[in-house]
Amino acid sequence: MTNDFPSSEDLKKAEEYVRRYAHYTPILSSSQINEKLGCSVLFKSEHLQKTGSFKARGALNALMGLMEGEVPKGVVTHSSGNHGQALAWAAELLGVKAVVVVPKNAPSVKVEAIRAYGAEVFFCEPSLESREENCNRIRNERGFVVIPPFDDYRIIAGQSTMMQEVLEQEKDIDCAVIPVGGGGLFSGSLLAVADKRNTIIMYGAEPSASGDAIESFVTGVRVTKAGTQTIADGLRTALGVRNFDVISKHAEGILPASEENIKLALAWIYLYLKQAVEPSAAVSLAAIIENADLFKGKKVVSILCGGNLDLKSLPF
Amino acid sequence: MTNDFPSSEDLKKAEEYVRRYAHYTPILSSSQINEKLGCSVLFKSEHLQKTGSFKARGALNALMGLMEGEVPKGVVTHSSGNHGQALAWAAELLGVKAVVVVPKNAPSVKVEAIRAYGAEVFFCEPSLESREENCNRIRNERGFVVIPPFDDYRIIAGQSTMMQEVLEQEKDIDCAVIPVGGGGLFSGSLLAVADKRNTIIMYGAEPSASGDAIESFVTGVRVTKAGTQTIADGLRTALGVRNFDVISKHAEGILPASEENIKLALAWIYLYLKQAVEPSAAVSLAAIIENADLFKGKKVVSILCGGNLDLKSLPF
């Protein structure tokens, strides 16, 4: 286990950086959902964040930290999803060149979104090897800096700003349920709560069909392959090394969510909150539904982590 | 043409009543939509209103006005949609008994929503005749007061409070585009703007497939039958008498929206605003898309009028 987790100072700095350019997102609630579950659910609305997901926070923090030193020639990452858009946005905002390596089977709507933020898209084969190889090649050839999607302390500190905001926005929170893919948001949220010595009970939430984080947490050995048979496409990712370290130290547990409950939670979010989110954003509520006894009478934070929707993939 | 339009005093009173119990709804915007259209669109978010539509305003105002006199034994209306929910909610809030006459082929989800607010549901044949007949019968048998959905000055004054809020929330508005079904919201909005002697250019928006209001406005003779072949099911209604009078006097015009543009607008609202609204709520934006030349460089108010969604009916 590493000992160089982001410090209290790092989290404070991230909060200053992120507040400068990102949205302070609202918390929504629905009396209908609260009645159904017998608890009070607070939905932190990161689908309304810049670029449509919390990923804007981490990308911005990483890039602003870099800019404090020598301005980089450019930045590069690999992503088929929200991190690519987030880095493209942050780079355009700060006037830095960006390349996003994208698997050639990625949906064209995501590719267009990355290009709309002015980044160069580089297509590769749809495998993690090809993605990393091309990313590293561009780094070496062009002297660009790699900004990874989650396994990076600057990213983790950036994502911590979401939970820092929640702690300002709401008092007397009992628990929070944070979606887990690579673990950037969950590890950042854990550090934010630990830094304030707050006693909120912190759970992760993961699709059962991609249960590597649950297995890693329970066995203490990081599983490096994630299942892909979940509608929550943003969470088809194995835990990062640094993320696993933080989670092992600070999490209460990681709760499973069945595909059935993810679809039910997604319907509730559309019908009762009237918010159009991507399926991954329903996993936190799905885990609350699936483990409702844990939360009876409690005040629970749930995360609408993203809203970058492929309309054709809606399961209704 | 009648001369007893709601007075300035009536509108002020409605604003006081409605503010007491309804939401002051936010205005949303999307830089992506603005870029596509070359204008600045402000979306008044009535899908986030109590009961999921602006109808809560009119029902509340009508009922609170009634309560100032003798408390009624009960209230009755006919509705297969948002007005039924709105009246049921307002009646429960103020402790009055409510009956909603519902065509027997209405979606069960709407019937459940009306019942969830504590109202009694009375099923009738799916025709306007049967709806009105049963509504009047219940009035006569039980001594209840009828609260009509739109052709009523108390309702019109209540709906005016939406535009009253918009005028407080935003300055320098050039135009507004208000969806038209029975015309309650549009006539109320027109009176709100006229009362403030504001120079905002006021358009209605109507599905071409249900173009009775456009024909009525152009010919000066109220058409009493509306087309039903539109996805915007909330607007399959012919203009009311009082609504037609107000619209004839104060509107700049009524803009058509094709089914294709309604679907496109709906997709933009989901993708860029990330709001889950019902199809009728896309008609205002669809009319802006269809008549984009009118709005170049302008600041335009568009209305997300409701969010009571049948997930199965989404056209994606």
Image: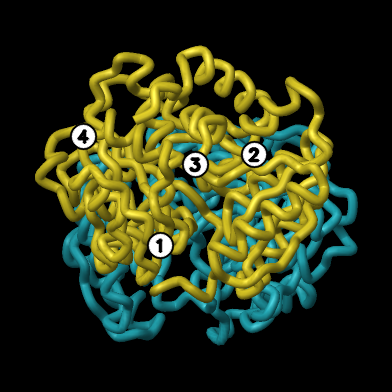
Chain colours: A yellow, B cyan
Please state the horizontal and vertical placement of residue B119, each as a whole percent of the image: 21, 58
**Mark 3 → mark 2, Cα distance in angstroms:** 45 Å
Mark linked to residue A252: 4
Q: Mark 1 belongs to which amino acid?
A: Ala
Q: Are marks 4 and 1 in contact (CB under 8 Å)?
A: no
**Residue at 76% in and 48% down:** A140
For badge 4, the amino acid type reads Glu
Alpha carbon distance from label 4 to label 2: 46 Å
- Residue A128 in percent (x, y) is at 54, 62
- The residue drawn where x is 70% and y is 74% is B261
Callout 4 secondary element: loop
Image quarter hosting the C terminus of chain B: bottom right
Q: Position of residue A90 (x, y in %)?
A: 71, 39
Say what secondary structure mark 1 lies in. Answer: loop
Residue at 88% x, 60% y is B294
In this rendering, which labeled residue sits more in front, label 3 or label 1? 3
Question: Tag 2: residue type?
Answer: Val
Which label lies toward us, 4 or 1?
Answer: 4
Placement of the N terminus of chain B among the 4 image quadrants: bottom right
Dot placed on the residue nearer the N-terminal end, 4 or 3: 3
Mark 4–mark 2 CB contact (< 8 Å): no
Viewer-side residue, B85 vs A136? A136
- Residue B93 seen by the camera: yes
Numbered disc 4: what chain? A
Name the disc covering residue A300, or none: none
Q: Write down the chain letter for disc 1.
A: A
Q: Which residue is mark 2?
A: B166
Which residue is labeled 1 in the image?
A: A232
